[in-house]
Image (tube, rainbow, N blue to C red):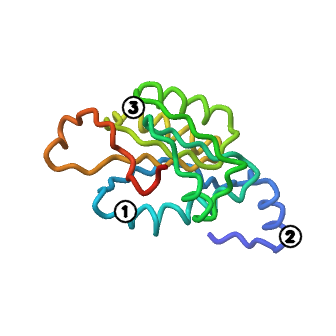
Amino acid sequence: MITPHSVNDFSKQMRAMPEVTTSIGGINQICYDNASPTLLNLLLLPAIKQLGQQAKWMLWLTPENKLDRSWLEHSGISLSKSVQIPMLDDDQKLDSMTQALKSGNYSVITVWLDSTLSAEQQNSLDFLAKESDTVVFILHKNSPHNRSTRQMSHQKIPTFAFL
């Protein structure tokens, strides 16, 4: 049996439905190669620039190297809303990323990791990123000879990004 519904009934039903909000937050893992930095220049930087237009901060968790300020400025990324924390240890980066996501103060977090994330870490970070509406870019150096066991290297960020 078909039950007729009036327009007024439908509008009452719509008001009773909970409001759905969409989040742009989430985890994005990217493998890159120092020989071809165009991925970072052509894809990643415009996304970071656009996310940086929000009122929130941008966080860069890097190895010991410092980001090249002129490179960021040339890319159109605001230095006044950028925070860089250079670290050597992946555990420190993961802890810092977790705290930053919990704070909800960042629109984008870019982190360079030597190790891969476990499924549990990925799920936890993705949940926090969606909850805080933060986009996270996790960069891994693409290296065929040490794919299974990533070794510590002091040159993880492409040299074009540093002083």
Residue lying at the far front of the rendered structure: 163
Question: Residue 156 is drawn in which quadrant?
Answer: top left
Residue that appears at 17% across and 39% down = 148
* Residue 17 image point, x, y percent: 75, 54
Query: Eyeballing the image, is 10 above or below 117?
Result: below
Q: Is residue 155 left or right of residue 93?
A: left
Query: Eyeballing the image, is 149 above or below 108?
Result: above
Task: Give amino acid for label 1.
Answer: Pro
Query: Eyeballing the image, is 25 above or below 88?
Result: below
* Residue linked to disc 2: 8
Cβ–Cβ below 8 Å for labels 3 and 2? no
* Residue linked to disc 3: 120
Q: Is residue 104 left or right of residue 8?
A: left
Cβ–Cβ below 8 Å for labels 1 and 2? no
* Residue 105 image point, x, y percent: 70, 40
Q: Which label lies toward us, 1 or 3?
A: 1
Q: Who comes first in sequence, dot 1 or dot 2?
A: 2
Question: Residue 101 is drawn in which quadrant?
Answer: top right
Q: What is the spatial separation of the Cα atoms under label 3 and label 2, in whole angstroms?
A: 47 Å
Q: Nearer the viewer, residue 128 or 28?
A: 28
Residue that appears at 72% across and 49% down = 80
Task: Give amino acid for label 2.
Answer: Asn
Q: Is residue 91 left or right of residue 77?
A: left
Q: What is the spatial separation of the Cα atoms under label 1 and label 3, in whole angstroms?
A: 30 Å
Q: Nearer the viewer, residue 143 or 135?
A: 143
Task: Give amino acid for label 3.
Answer: Glu
Mark 3 Cα-neighbour bin, 10 Å: few <14, some 14–19, many ≥20? few
* Residue 136 image point, x, y percent: 52, 47
* Residue linked to disc 1: 37
Residue that appears at 54% across and 59% down = 71
- State the SS at label 2: helix
